[in-house]
Amino acid sequence: MENNPYKPEIAVIEKIREETTGPRAIKTFTVSFQDEKVKKSFTYKSGQTAMLSVFGKGECMICITSTPTKKGFLEFSVMLQGKVTSALHALKVGDTIGVRGPYGNDFPLDKWKGKNLLFIGGGIGQAPLRSVYLNALDNRKDYGDITLIYGARTLSDLAYKEEMFELEKRDDVNVFLCLDWKFGKDGIIDEEAEEGWVTINRKEPAKTKPRKGTSRFTGFVPEVVTAVKPSPENAIAVSCGPPIMIKYAVANLKTLGFKDDQIYTTLEMRMKCGIGKCGRCNIGSIYVCKDGPVFSMSQLEKIPKEY
Amino acid sequence: MSDIEGNIQAKAKKLLKDGTIKYFIGYENGSDPLHTTPCFIKKAEDVDKIVWNPLCVNNLAGYLTHDKKRELKKGEEEDKKPIGILVKGCDSKSLVQLLSEHRIEKDEVIIFGVPCDGVIDPKKLEKVLKDKNLSVNTIDSLTIQHDGKNYTVKVNGKKYSFPKDKIEMSKCSDCTQPNPIISDETFGEKVKKSDKKDYKTVEEIEALPLAKRWKFWSDQFAKCIRCSACRNVCPVCYCKECVVDSADLVITPQTTSSEKANKMPWLEKNVDPAENMFFHLTRMMHMAGRCINCGECERACPMNIPLSLLTKKLEKEVKEMFDYEAGIDVEAKPLLSIFEEDDPGDFIK
Amino acid sequence: MTSSNSFKAENFVIKKEDVAQFLKGLSDYTIYAPVQEEDTVLFKVIQNPDKIALHITNTVKSPKFVVLPQTETMLKVTKGKENSIKIDEPVLDEKNILFGIRPCDARGIAILDKVFSGDYKDPYYVKRRANTIMIGLACTDPHRNCFCTSVGGAPDSTDGLDMLWTDIGDLYFVTVLTKKGMKLVKETVIFSKATSENTRVMNKVHKTAHEKITEKLNADALPKKLENLFEDKYWDEVSMKCLGCGSCTYLCPTCYCFDINDIEYRDKVKRVRTWDSCQFSSYTIHTSGHNPRPNKENRMRNRVYHKYKYHHDNYNELGCVGCGRCITYCPVDMNLKATIKELAEK
């Protein structure tokens, strides 16, 4: 059969990095196609996804977390969730999986040239962002300020830790990490999550005074957005993470003056075909698999709130 | 409009007006003159939609569990008022079964009982009318009267008489429960019907040699398209999670990935004879001692699989082996949860 | 997908008694036609043309399964030593004829043609479809739930067809619409050129059929209307009696949603496509347990929106052909015609 979009290519797992552990552990798989021709011809853009197969268990749609500026391999960060992700987590280096794609749209990095970029990520939501900011950093001169705000529940839930710590050292990118509040039996405990992590002023996040030289906070991501006070001027904000985080982060961005067409996010849905045929990922007349996953807030305004 | 219909409307109106019930489940006229359809009346002024006639086929009892499966909308509060429901004799058995299994409690429902002398099978009616050159397209009015052995069907002002067995639902021919077992108010006179179940159709299949019986059921199940109409229409198939839906998990944030991953796919979605047979036999096994033979699964099946043969067989077996009948007693313990010393054990060998 | 654009239709007639001979001559093809078994009429593979039942307006199941089977193996995967994996695709070279397909069902397939081609081609569908010849039979006795004329169709619509046959008494009037159809006619001497009298009778039959469908719904208003009815209370009310089964969608000639699952054997895996239904809660449930369409009102709304708005947004035509099956076979008599009417009047 010629050009069968349902037929995956075989890829070998070259590296597995344990990002986080626990019941919702995240592993990053570095894979490369067995077939040299495919390896050369497979191109993608930041924000696109691919359908991964563990033969016998099924398929799942995962965003490509590596940057297209690095060739020859693909990276996928997979959180332990269900049948296929469990099977993926059980694989070892050298094992094979199926990969088909890339699918969906991408973040319009070309259109964003010359702009300041703000990335707001939470938990596994950092995975789609990573492809974009690594891409932008590899084309550093094309963009203005690049700012990353990334939060997780605890330090051990922070993915891409070493990479983030390296980025913190660079002076051409602003990195703000944050960890959720510690919880005691009476609720939130007002103290540093880790030594040296500045506690956000919870009543008025904007008044938080970071200690000199640090950019690590104890607090929720949306509050950090307010504390960091990014300027909406000539800026694009991209936010991925838990829905509740996105909701408040976007609200705080709007308070800072960001407009709907300056704010982007990604959506996820149950998917099977990946090519807009099987039906289930529709929101209104669009299919998230092929028309998404990247949407600006002004685009989301126009579709039914059914996600 | 019959007195019964009027009295049902009046009572429903009263209960809606004084806020006793959240809604009333009954029947209204359907998509064409041969059909009635379930209706949910929420406002007192809408009660005149309610109809009662021999076309009121559906068993409405299953709807009582629908609200419990519904996910509340944001900001929506659960209405805990009881539901008013209309039940025929057979439907009341389903209701009793649901009460005995505590899927619903007595204070969650106000039961309008109506003795029933049989209901019409719309498919059969369409057929006999067609034989008289009456296409449904041309029917403006249709009323049905019952006079013991025959039904008088008045179509566009002209009367036709049909023998009962030609147009009645086949489940009605040996009905032993024409009067509601349980009700808060009964509408109409009690009806006398047969007191003996007729298992002739089941016995005909039982008498077939194994190979023929196998072929018969294989052919029947091969028709199945697995639309789940039989399961979803069944008043006692109320589970939130069904064994045949391997993907349809009841998942909470606490469900671990390994629980999800190790979920046994008992049944694949493939439509093939083996999977289809597994679907139906599994369903039947879960019906043992619970199915009251309302015939809804057979009626709902678009592919005309004679599922009542299976449910009747089940009823017969349960009766013969355990002297048990489902849907008779609210206090009864479920058959499969009780053990008697003299239970037959010869099926385990 | 049909080559009707460049083809000028030609008219023939065939004697009814010659139909069996015509079909017997098509031995290269697998012929599907309506067959009655007990009370159920379905499209089945025909060995004996005498069994064909053309008197029923519509079969229970639409014949879409010939081009989109309810179950099909997409890939066979063999796991070998040292992580080697071999993937085999099926060979789909069976040639099919759909004989006696009604114009609404043919339009259904014409709608599917667009869905399965487009920016991504579905090779399984495309291959099967290219190998399928559709011989339609014009409706002369529309069913009580038929509403094809309200959704852009007609009892004599030619959409998707290679030939349209019309019962004109002792003869079938045969309009050949494509080269594929012409090839079949040319292969035998059974067909003769239609006379002007034949044409007159045919036109009369078509006209009578049109007149029999008296109900005209304002379905064309829906794509616009539905823009503002997504949050309407109507969906809660109208869906209350819905059982959430899939009979409406599985019998529908335009529903095409599917699922893909792996079935694991010892060292082999079959990747299987099956029909799926937006009426099932498992259809949209995320692995996390979150379901964007948790209740039947959400799911029923999606079914109606898909057919009367979303499909229209994407393909500029309604995703419904008005065959009425979803009404006829609904266990609780859900009435889509009434729904269309009520929505159009909102």
Image (cartoon, coloured by chain):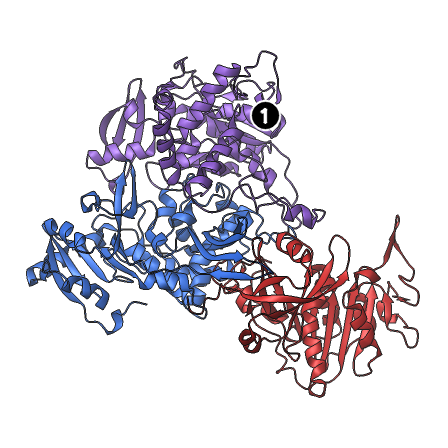
Chain colours: A red, B purple, C blue
Q: Quadrant of the N terminus of chain B?
A: top left
Residue at screen point 19% across, 33% down: B132
Relative to residue B101, is residue B227 depicted above or below?
below
Residue at screen point 63% across, 49% down: B73
Q: Could you tell whether C147 is left or right of A219 in the image?
A: left
Residue carrying label 1 = B99
Relative to residue A214, is residue B179 depicted above or below?
above
Q: From where the camera sits, is residue B130 visible?
A: yes
Closer to the camera in the image, B153 or C146 = C146
Q: Could you tell whether B188 is left or right of A42 in the image?
A: left
For label 1, the crowd category at 10 Å Cα-Cα, with few meaning under 14, some 14 to 19 and many 20 or more, is many
**Residue B143 x/y as whole percent:** 31, 30
Q: Quadrant of the C terminus of chain B?
A: top right
Relative to residue A11, is residue B277 depicted above or below?
above
Parent chain of label 1:
B
Closer to the camera in the image, B309 or B344 = B344
Residue at screen point 32% across, 35% down: B123
Q: Could you tell whether C48 is left or right of C345 in the image?
A: left
Q: From where the camera sits, is residue A241 visible?
A: no
Please state which amino acid type lies under the numbered disc 1: Leu
**Residue B313 x/y as whole percent:** 43, 23
Relative to residue A281, is residue B52 depicted above or below?
above
